[in-house]
């Protein structure tokens, strides 16, 4: 099979018929064998019925229905597991990504030899203040920390060699950084293609302001786990030593000063205590976060979701 198209969706009943007709047209015109896997991420509207109808007419359209909303990463992960195509494409269900891009993306994987090709919504049809500007900051941070030169890490439209999606695991909200995760798994040829972006035609965005906070936290986690996941002591040990030495130096300084100046009263200032407790508390929270993350990654159920129904997939 040439292509697997993975489409996570949450309450997108209006978009689905138009989207599937469009995909079908493009892929038939290009003479490609394919499967489309819809992952219904706990929709409460009629999306699943719509998917059932679509797949009755064309059995290349398949579906997985989650019992509840687990998030886009979980949906993608489930799609990655099911995918059989040589090239795997992910795209959003809301018609903001154009299926016309699919053949070219596939060509870049097959002929261009890329492991991943990420879409780049160069001209973006979203709210400037809540989406476009924060996303620029995000991408800059992701570029800096990962060394991957992409403009648009979070673009829903991406193409992968099958091997890539079978080698990686996404959960939490890590769908934003799949290229970073893939790089961590040894896939280095990561390319980019400017793709057409469209305004959302039906429904509303499913991601609110929390995306900014969660997005940054996930970036820290991925960078950390990629680098130190198997050797956490190199991280904790190093910084622990640095902080210990700084503490030791300060204590020596305080003691020595105490002996030299008789009216030395650094500890009389409230700011001293506030700074002290804030730094200690913050450090502890951060480190416990990392430790918890390491533990979570070893939990057997980290990527197990309840599935209510399947179409066309065993
Ligand atoms: N989505 C999902 N589960 C979620 C949230 C979103 O499967 O919990 C799907 C959504 O239906 C859409 C895609 O992920 O197909 C991208 O979401 P959205 O368009 O709301 O994000 P935006 O384009 O606003 O960044
Ligand atoms: Mg969208």
Image (cartoon, rainbow, N blue to C red):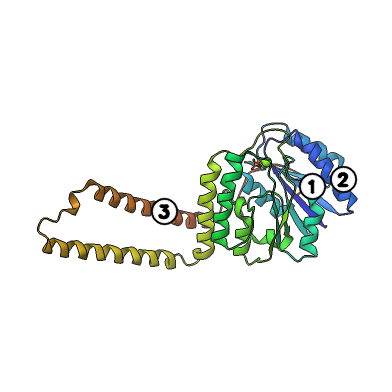
On the image, which quarter does residue 32 sit in? Answer: bottom right
**Residue at the left extreme, as displayed:** 262
Ligand 1 within 8 Å, label 1 CB: no
* Residue 102 percent coordinates (x, y): 79, 52
On the image, which quarter does residue 260 sit in? Answer: bottom left
CA separation, marks 1 and 2?
Answer: 9 Å
* Location of ligand 1 given as a quarter of the image: top right
The disc, 2 or 3, on the residue closer to the chain's N-terminal end is 2
Q: Which residue is mark 3?
A: 286
Q: Is residue 54 left or right of residue 232?
A: right
Q: Residue at x 38, y 64 (%)?
A: 239
* Residue 111 percent coordinates (x, y): 80, 65
Q: Which residue is mark 1?
A: 99
Circle 2 residues within 10 Å: few <14, some 14–19, many ≥20? some
Q: Nearer the viewer, mark 1 or mark 3?
A: 1
Q: Are marks 1 and 2 in contact (CB under 8 Å)?
A: yes
The disc, 1 or 2, on the residue closer to the chain's N-terminal end is 2
Q: Secondary structure at mark 2?
A: helix
Disc count in the image? 3
Q: Can you tell which mark lies on residue 25?
A: 2
Judge by depth and name the residue closer to the eye, 60 or 18: 18
Q: Residue at x 69, y 54 (%)?
A: 80
Q: Is residue 37 left or right of residue 266?
A: right
Q: Is residue 19 above or below residue 101?
A: above
Residue 283 seen in render: yes
Q: Can you tell which mark lies on residue 257?
A: none
CA separation, marks 1 and 3?
Answer: 42 Å
């Amino acid at each position: 099979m040439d292509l697997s198209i993975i489409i996570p969706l949450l309450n997108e009943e209006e978009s689905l018929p138009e989207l599937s007709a469009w995909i079908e047209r493009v892929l038939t015109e290009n003479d490609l064998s394919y499967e489309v896997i819809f992952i219904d991420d706990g929709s409460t509207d009629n999306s699943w019925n719509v998917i059932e109808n679509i797949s009755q007419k064309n059995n290349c359209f398949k579906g997985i229905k989650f019992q509840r909303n687990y998030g886009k990463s979980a949906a993608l992960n489930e799609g990655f597991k099911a995918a059989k195509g040589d090239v795997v494409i992910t795209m959003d269900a809301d018609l903001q990504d154009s299926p016309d891009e699919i053949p070219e993306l596939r060509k870049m994987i097959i002929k261009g030899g890329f492991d991943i090709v990420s879409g780049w919504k160069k001209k973006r049809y979203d709210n400037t203040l809540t989406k476009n500007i924060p996303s620029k900051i995000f991408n800059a941070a992701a570029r800096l920390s990962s060394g991957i030169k992409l403009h648009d890490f979070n673009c829903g439209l991406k193409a992968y060699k099958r091997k890539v999606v079978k080698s990686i695991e996404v959960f939490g909200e890590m769908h934003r950084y799949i290229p970073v995760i893939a790089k961590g798994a040894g896939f280095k040829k990561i390319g980019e293609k400017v793709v057409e972006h469209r305004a959302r035609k039906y429904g509303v965005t499913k991601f609110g302001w929390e995306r900014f906070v969660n997005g940054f936290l996930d970036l820290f986690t991925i960078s950390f786990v990629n680098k130190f996941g198997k050797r956490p002591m190199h991280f904790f040990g190093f910084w622990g030593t640095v902080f210990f030495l700084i503490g030791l130096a300060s204590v020596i300084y305080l003691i020595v000063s105490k002996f030299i100046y008789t009216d030395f009263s650094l500890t009389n200032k409230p700011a001293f205590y506030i700074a002290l407790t804030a730094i200690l508390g913050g450090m502890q929270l951060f480190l416990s976060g990392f430790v918890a993350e390491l533990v979570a990654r070893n939990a057997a159920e980290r990527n197990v979701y309840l599935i209510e129904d399947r179409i066309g997939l065993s």
